[in-house]
Amino acid sequence: MKFIPNSIIKESMLKEIGLHTIDELFSDIPKKIRINNLNLPDGVSQQEVEKRLRELGKKNQSFYEMPSFLGGGIKPHYIPAAVKSIIARSEFYTSYTPYQPEASQGFLQAMFEYQSMIAEITGMDVANASLYDGATALGEAALMCNRIKKRKTFVIPKNISKDKKCILKNYTKGAGLTIKEIAYDTKTGKIDLDDLKKNIDDDTTGVYIENPNFFGVFEDDVDEISSLVKEKQAVFVVGVDPIALGITKNPGKYNADIVIGEGRSLGNPMDFGGSGLGIFSCKHEFIRQIPGRIIGLTEDSDGKRAFCMTMQTREQHIRRGRATSNICTNEGLCALAAVAFLSWLGGSGLEKLGRINFEKGQRLAKKITSIHGFEKVFCGVHFNEFVIQCPDAAKLHKKLLSNGIQGGLILDDIFPELKSSMLFGVTEIYSDESIEKLVSILKEGT
Amino acid sequence: MYRSAVYDEPLLNELEEKRNNTYTPVDVLPSSLQRKEKINIPDLDETQVIRHFFRLSQMNFGIDSGMYPLGSCTMKYNPRICEEISRWDSFAMTHPYQDESTIQGNLQIMYELEQLFCEITGMDCFTLQPAAGSQGEFTGLLLTQAYHESHHDFERNEIILPDTSHGTNPASATMAGYKIIEIPSTKEGTVDLEILKKTLSSNTACFMLTNPNTLGIFESDIEEIAKIVHKAGALLYYDGANINAIMGKARPGDMGFDIVHLNLHKTFSTPHGGGGPGAGPIGVKKKLETFLPIPRITKKRDIYYLNHDYPKSIGKIKAFYGNFSVLLKAYIYILLMGGDGLKESSEIAVLNANYMKKKLVDSEKYDLPYKELRKHEFVLSCERLYKEKGIRALDIAKRLLDYGLHPPTIYFPLIVKEALMIEPTESESKRTLDEYIKALIRIADENTDIVKNAPSNTSVRRVDEAGAIKNPILTWKSL
């Protein structure tokens, strides 16, 4: 079974078009570079492959075998069976980018609904149909700021993930942007407003903040930050966790211009870090500058409601070297999971989910900080992640691991000033048993 | 005759029966961040949600529905086993920051996948990080930059491309900060060596090439091309979108390419997912290895590590380690196919394309500009039909939908007028190919009005795309 139906009739097909051998079809490849075979093993049966993959799977510890309390922007969330069943429809997943709208109304309508929901929860007017992940969305946002305001400095908080900083640097190098980092307040874990004030000037194209930020802390001085940015006529970019938007006001309410985020938590598994879902939304006035696919509602020739990709003149397949981005393949199926997830939850469900995550975050922090030697590093109100300073993070990690638990993310490498600290994360999916187990091992000490 | 399901399916927000407008804020939140009102997302029952998306799925055409010969997109069958295994908890429920000792399975898969790609392409090492082909291109160009800079060569600010190149090539080059020089193809539809020689200079960073090119023609002068590009001190980049044509027959590494990207959602059979997720791994020659993104996967005494210790690396291009679920599916696919299966895929993909090409050219309804022998795809022109009957490539595309056949890529590459770019892949049976050929021949003879007013058997008739641009309605709030 090789998924090649014409394999058994190739001789007669060759004959029909006046050829004798397969090699004749490759006669235009110079002999010197022609090869006869790949030096790989022959294919094996599906049964055999499944067996091998089971063995490989056993070499991993999944969340259910070893609960992990890792923060840092990626955590497991519950995925309803309904969502799994929707994205498993092969009419959806075996289709491509909907270049032919008449044959793709299903996916197009779903993406229009995705855009509508993302715009709603972020408080923006429009959203695109997805980017690769939250980190590349930041790179694209910085480039978009530069298209809107032709200035050369993009301002970010010091406390964002290392991956994001590096990706941002790579994405903005070609445009010649300088990245400026703003300190965080060492007490609250929030952005240092004085440092921000000092660093926004007439060369600032955009300012990025995250809410909640990398330390899990809510940035609540948002109105002040927003006015600082607007005073200098820079573009205001906010990164969000969509689950937190269930309980907080949306960035539209504090005058953000572009809202981005990692949308994986909406119906997509952790998948060892990929595939992610880059959320990208903005105010209406900037729609011509958006990167990536956008779906619009229109009519067919009978005047019936219909959907299609729109404003394609921004995109690489039309505009080539002058496109707003090079993105072609995006994360369509992950966006489909997100819209299915949000419609399964409903507005009320998202509010409830946000609340549960918030409360679980508070409860776990309280339990951990009640143990002698474990302190919350920042006093700012946190969502479902928080930083804990503990006696010996590296040793603790090993101890937890030997007890079948993956502890928080050790921050020493990323923020050397936060010595022996762990970024813990928790969501609705964590059982009381696993939380109790974590706490009891922490109590034992190292 | 084909008929698509037609539902006047309301939008999700139109399905809501009753709205509960009460919202109780979370009082311990800072007041400046308190949400004060309901989130305006409809509250529906699971029964409504499932029916909605089920109906939408029935108004969507996938490879499982029928032939989908989009040129340069390699729409091949997606084996079910790859889907199923990729959803197992042992893979899907692993965290990228878990202790290395608890993710040895994932790391082994990634390590071995890199080795497999090295053998298939003839390159020395791979990174699996890029999320799609175009991100792979961008990564390749960052590597190009790092390479020249490491030689204290800061003058190379130009990328050369043939006029047949994919749109992502120039777009990626611009993003990486390069100036683009597009060179015209020869009468044969291939790279013009003389023009290339004249265009190459001490400013050239890289020449980007697809081989076979987007006309489906193998660039037979490739060894000479590699020689003159390298002589000018530039690098040679392989856009791997079309590698389904040559697996087990020739390798970009042997042709002299320095950097290669692969589209796993094309050649390695991972589903396109309605536009993603994909994966665009990058392979390079030894001289570029030190610049590859981190972490690299290394192996020492049968233990796999995420190695960050590459000080000259360009760093990261995407969060974590790439689209792992896609990588996993490609790995399974390669195990299933083996070296013999991959080779046969390319052989039959090329046979299928040449079979269709011959039958369609013989019908004398369509013309084949440029060279005769094609690889996995071919580009026809219906310019004659346009002149004689006013029927355009777009009309033919729409009429094919009435026959339950997905149209080919149209109006690309740009050097062919009224282009139909057809890539059948190895997944289609002769019966399906014949059906497609028959439909294309029949459409050429059909009444012009029928063709120009097509489609009528789809869930909607021809969509007013111009109207969508004139009056952008991008969310349901704008209705």
Image (tube, rainbow, N blue to C red):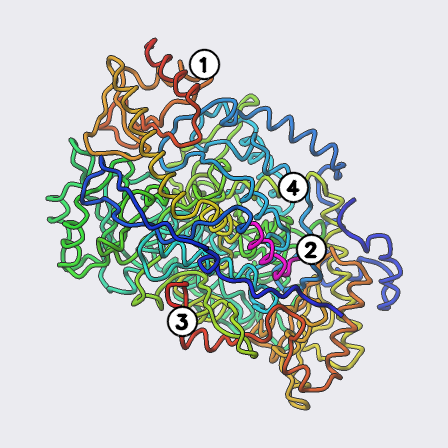
Percent x, y of residue A331: 49, 51
> Can residue B203 be seen from the camera position used here?
no
Instruction: Name the amino acid type tagged 2.
Output: Asp
Q: Secondary structure at mark 1?
A: helix
The answer to whether tags 3 and 2 share a subunit is yes
> Can residue A380 be seen from the camera position used here?
yes
The answer to whether tags 4 and 3 share a subunit is yes
Return the residue at label 1: A402
Instruction: Give the total number of marks visible in the rendering.
Output: 4
Instruction: Name the amino acid type tagged 4.
Output: Cys
- Quarter occupied by the C terminus of chain B: bottom left
In the displayed structure image, the side of residue B464 where residue A75 appears, left or right? left
Percent x, y of residue A66: 48, 22
The answer to whether tags 4 and 2 share a subunit is yes
Instruction: Name the amino acid type tagged 1.
Output: Ser
- Which mark's residue is nearer the viewer, 3 or 1? 3
Residue at position x 32%, y 66% in the image: A284
Picture disc at residue B472: 3
Dot 3 or dot 2, earlier in sequence: 2
Dot 4 or dot 3, earlier in sequence: 4
Picture disc at residue B82: 4
**Which chain's residue wears label 3?**
B
Return the residue at label 2: B64
| Magenta region | B50-64
Q: Secondary structure at mark 4?
A: helix
